[in-house]
């Protein structure tokens, strides 16, 4: 049904980059934030400034991961270790939390100024899934998940939300671990084997594979179809509307 195998009765959708056109907003906020930090550091250490790569660095180290995990993973890729700091560190603090908080201020500024766009194909797919009686959850690493879902006007179409705040309060490990997707399936009352994961991030597809979900759809918005397959996507589309055309997988 809807391009999914017969045993699938529920859909677990990632948010940024799958339902809403906000992956690029996160990416831009991270790029500016990391570049500011790296420039300061280069000036302090006399080492050359090597900017954050919004393609490679974002996809490998930041995309899909919880905010502070993204900071740690990227810094580790440059052999940089910073103090953790605390959640209320100011945005200029050179700590894991300070950098994450700086990115969040930039992200919210942009989201609140320009609003949130939904992918038209995703809206169509969500409506078709609702009409077909498939269960529907959104599972996002973002602590801003509630705000983005509301700004996108998707609240009515999603039965369950597992976001970064839920993950924090329930101590769920972030993607690429499967915990948040497993929590989404559990809240819908569906076994992982009967749920399909929809993900645009490499870490998210890896989480879908690790959780032994019934089907993993890779959503390729940036030309990384091969990498999504290599992480374990069963099928890769460029837009969810493609699944409405192909009624059965592989058809
Ligand atoms: O900083 P937030 O809003 O909690 O989001 C955390 C992460 O959420 C993911 O959905 C994005 O792919 C990442 O880019 C982002 O860093």
Image: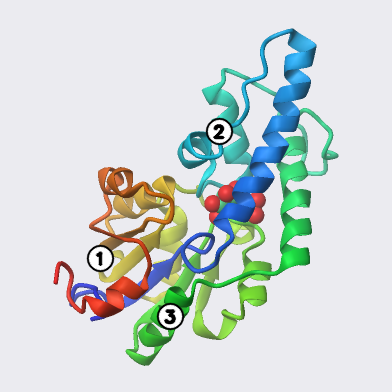
Q: Which residue is mark 1?
A: 193
- Inspect this view and state whether residue 83 appears: no
- Return the x and y of residue 139 as percentages of the image width and height: 49, 63
Distance (Cα) linking label 2 and label 1? 36 Å
Q: Residues within 10 Å of mark 2 (few under 14, many from 20)?
A: few
* Residue at the image position 37 percent from the left and 86 percent from the top: 128
- Whichever of callouts 2 and 1 sits on the residue coming sooner in the sequence is 2
- Return the x and y of residue 233 as percentages of the image width and height: 28, 53
- Whichever of callouts 1 and 3 sits on the residue coming sooner in the sequence is 3
Judge whether 108 appears above or below 176 on screen.
Answer: below
Q: Residues within 10 Å of mark 3 (few under 14, many from 20)?
A: many
Q: Which residue is mark 2?
A: 53
* Residue at the image position 14 percent from the left and 72 percent from the top: 251
Q: Nearer the viewer, mark 1 or mark 3?
A: 3
* Residue at the image position 30 percent from the left and 72 percent from the top: 242
- Return the x and y of residue 228 as percentages of the image width and height: 32, 48
User: Which residue sits furthest bottom?
Assistant: 131
* Residue at the image position 64 percent from the left and 59 percent from the top: 165
Q: Nearer the viewer, mark 2 or mark 1?
A: 2
């Amino acid at each position: 049904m809807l391009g999914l195998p017969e045993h699938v009765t529920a859909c677990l959708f990632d948010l940024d980059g799958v339902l809403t056109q906000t992956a690029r907003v996160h990416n831009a906020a991270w790029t500016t934030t990391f570049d500011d930090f790296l420039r300061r550091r280069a000036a302090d250490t006399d080492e050359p400034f090597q900017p954050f790569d919004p393609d490679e660095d974002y996809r490998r180290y930041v995309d899909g991961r919880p905010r502070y995990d993204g900071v740690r993973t990227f810094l580790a890729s440059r052999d940089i270790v910073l103090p953790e700091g605390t959640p209320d560190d100011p945005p200029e603090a050179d700590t894991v939390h300070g950098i994450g908080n700086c990115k969040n201020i930039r992200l919210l500024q942009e989201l609140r100024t320009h609003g949130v766009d939904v992918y038209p194909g995703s809206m169509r797919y969500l409506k078709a899934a609702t009409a077909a009686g498939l269960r529907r959850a959104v599972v996002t690493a973002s602590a801003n998940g509630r705000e983005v879902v509301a700004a996108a006007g998707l609240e009515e179409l999603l039965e369950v939300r597992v976001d970064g705040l839920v993950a924090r309060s329930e101590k769920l490990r972030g993607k690429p671990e499967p915990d948040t997707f497993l929590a989404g399936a559990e809240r819908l009352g569906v076994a992982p084997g009967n749920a399909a994961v929809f993900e645009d991030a490499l870490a998210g597809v890896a989480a879908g594979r690790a959780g032994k979900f019934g089907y993993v759809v890779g959503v390729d918005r940036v030309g990384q179809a091969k990498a999504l397959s290599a992480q374990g996507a069963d099928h890769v589309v460029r837009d969810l509307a493609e699944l409405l055309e192909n009624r059965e997988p592989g058809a």
